[in-house]
Image (cartoon, rainbow, N blue to C red):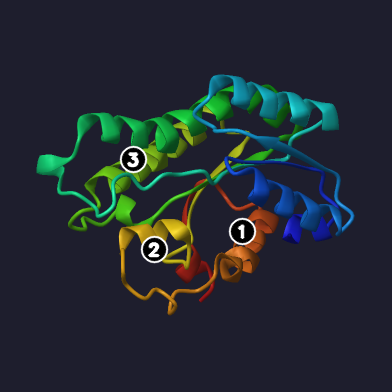
């Protein structure tokens, strides 16, 4: 919503058609040009379609990797974590973002753009049950650090928003009341401030940036 208010051209995607159309309508109502694609980022054809839709707008200033999956719920210990399930987590949380970055690099280089990938405190802290999701986010963080070293003219941000009131967070704590967690919109001003600052590539926590 924040980018739409500033009249950015937007390419968005989601796996659920009703939610995608709702968001597209809301963003369009703010005057933004929006291309909405239904699909899954773990699908190579969908990633190609996303980049093609972006090329139609002519440039790419910002790529946001927000898609993630938690894995099994309730969260299993690593000693019993299904390898096929873990493979799915890494496919969506690590390999798909890297593949999308690779495809988008020509456009990003033209605009000296920015890549933001959503991280988690589970990437740096060892929490019981969070071995699958946390290790995938740790891997994504490290990919960002290496990309920043290899491609110095772009900015790569790993952004840890903190606990939020989302379906994924609820799945991590089935049956528990998570209404004390902030809505995702609460961290948007902090993220926009980071983007506008054009700070050096790195890992940033919303709780620290907001201090």
Residue 136 — which label? 3
Give the quadrant of residue 109: top right
Q: Which residue is mark 1?
A: 194
Residue 70 — which label? none
Q: Secondary structure at mark 1?
A: helix
Name which residue lies at 76% across and 49% down. Answer: 24
Give the quadrant of residue 152: top right
Q: In the rendered structure, which disc, 1 or 2, sits on the residue that comes first in sequence?
A: 2
Name which residue lies at 76% across and 29% down. Answer: 53
Q: Which residue is mark 2?
A: 170
Image coords of residue 124 (percent x, y):
29, 53
Image coords of residue 27 (percent x, y):
79, 55
Residue 55 lies left or right of residue 202; in this view the side is right
- Closer to the observer: label 1 or label 3? 3
Dot 2 crowding, Cα within 10 Å, few <14, some 14–19, many 20+: some
- Closer to the observer: label 1 or label 2? 2
Q: Tell me how far mark 1 sits from mark 3, CA to CA.
A: 24 Å
Q: Tell me how far mark 1 sits from mark 2, CA to CA.
A: 27 Å
Q: Is residue 137 visible?
A: yes
Dot 1 crowding, Cα within 10 Å, few <14, some 14–19, many 20+: some
Residue 41 lies left or right of residue 188; in this view the side is left
Q: In the rendered structure, which disc, 1 or 3, sits on the residue that comes first in sequence?
A: 3
Work out whether 176 lies above or below 112: below
The residue lying toward the viewer, choosing from 147 and 73, is 73
> Going by the picture, which residue comes out furthest to the right?
31
Image coords of residue 17 (percent x, y):
65, 43
């Amino acid at each position: 919503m924040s980018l739409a208010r500033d009249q950015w051209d937007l390419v968005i995607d989601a796996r659920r058609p009703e939610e995608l159309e709702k968001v597209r309508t809301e963003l369009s109502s703010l005057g933004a040009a929006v291309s909405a694609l239904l699909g899954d980022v773990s699908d190579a054809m969908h990633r190609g379609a996303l980049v093609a839709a972006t090329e139609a707008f002519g440039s790419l200033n910002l790529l946001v990797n927000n898609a993630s999956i938690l894995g099994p719920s309730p969260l299993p210990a690593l000693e019993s974590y299904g390898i096929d399930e873990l493979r799915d987590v890494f496919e969506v949380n690590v390999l798909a973002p890297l593949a999308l970055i690779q495809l988008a690099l020509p456009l990003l280089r033209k605009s000296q753009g920015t890549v933001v990938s959503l991280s988690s405190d589970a990437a740096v802290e060892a929490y019981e049950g969070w071995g699958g999701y946390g290790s995938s986010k740790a891997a994504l963080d490290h990919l960002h650090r290496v990309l920043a070293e290899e491609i110095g003219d772009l900015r790569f941000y790993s952004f840890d928003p903190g606990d939020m009131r989302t379906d994924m967070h609820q799945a991590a704590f089935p049956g528990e009341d998570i209404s004390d967690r902030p809505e995702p919109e609460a961290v948007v001003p902090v993220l926009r401030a980071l983007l506008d600052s054009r700070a050096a590539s790195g890992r940033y926590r919303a709780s620290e940036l907001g201090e």
